[in-house]
Amino acid sequence: MSHTPHELAEEFPAQTDVIHRLKESDAHFARLADEYHAINRAVHRAETGVEPVDELVETGMRKQRAALKDDIARMLAKA
């Protein structure tokens, strides 16, 4: 497992099987998961100073990550 915090498997540990199934069967869910993964990596790189960004940019990325997580959580609740 990755050392990047906030990975979906860590955020929803009881639903890793559902996440995997939805990634394979639901194109919209797969896109959301891919977007979440990309923005989560960008946030992590910003937080660790690997790719520093302006504070407002970092805040915006965190909000985007949270919105994607909320969408994913809603889809998992329905699955």
Image (spheres, rainbow, N blue to C red):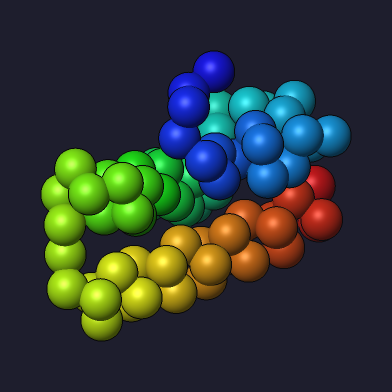
Location of residue 66 with respect to 60 vertically, above or below: above
Identify the image quadrant of the N terminus. top right
Location of residue 76 with respect to 1 vertically, above or below: below
Taking depth in this image into account, of 58 and 8 the one nearest to the observer is 58
Taking depth in this image into account, of 73 and 26 the one nearest to the observer is 73
Q: For this view, does 54 lie left or right of residue 63? A: left
Instruction: Please indicate, yes or no, whether residue 26 appears anywhere in the rendered image.
Output: no
How many marks do you count on the picture? 0
Q: Residue furthest front?
A: 49
Residue 69 location in percent, x, y? 58, 59
Q: Residue furthest bottom?
A: 56
Residue 35 location in percent, x, y? 37, 51
Q: For this view, does 58 lie left or right of residue 18? A: left
The image quadrant that residue 38 belongs to is: top left
Taking depth in this image into account, of 49 and 45 the one nearest to the observer is 49
Residue drawn where x is 16% and y is 64% of the image: 53
Residue 10 location in percent, x, y? 67, 36
Residue drawn where x is 52% and y is 41% of the image: 5
Instruction: Please indicate, yes or no, whether residue 34 appears anywhere in the rendered image.
Output: yes
Residue drawn where x is 80% and y is 47% of the image: 79
Q: For this view, does 15 lie left or right of residue 6? A: right
Location of residue 78 with respect to 38 vertically, above or below: below
The image quadrant that residue 37 belongs to is: top left
Q: Residue furthest top?
A: 1
Residue drawn where x is 33% and y is 76% of the image: 60
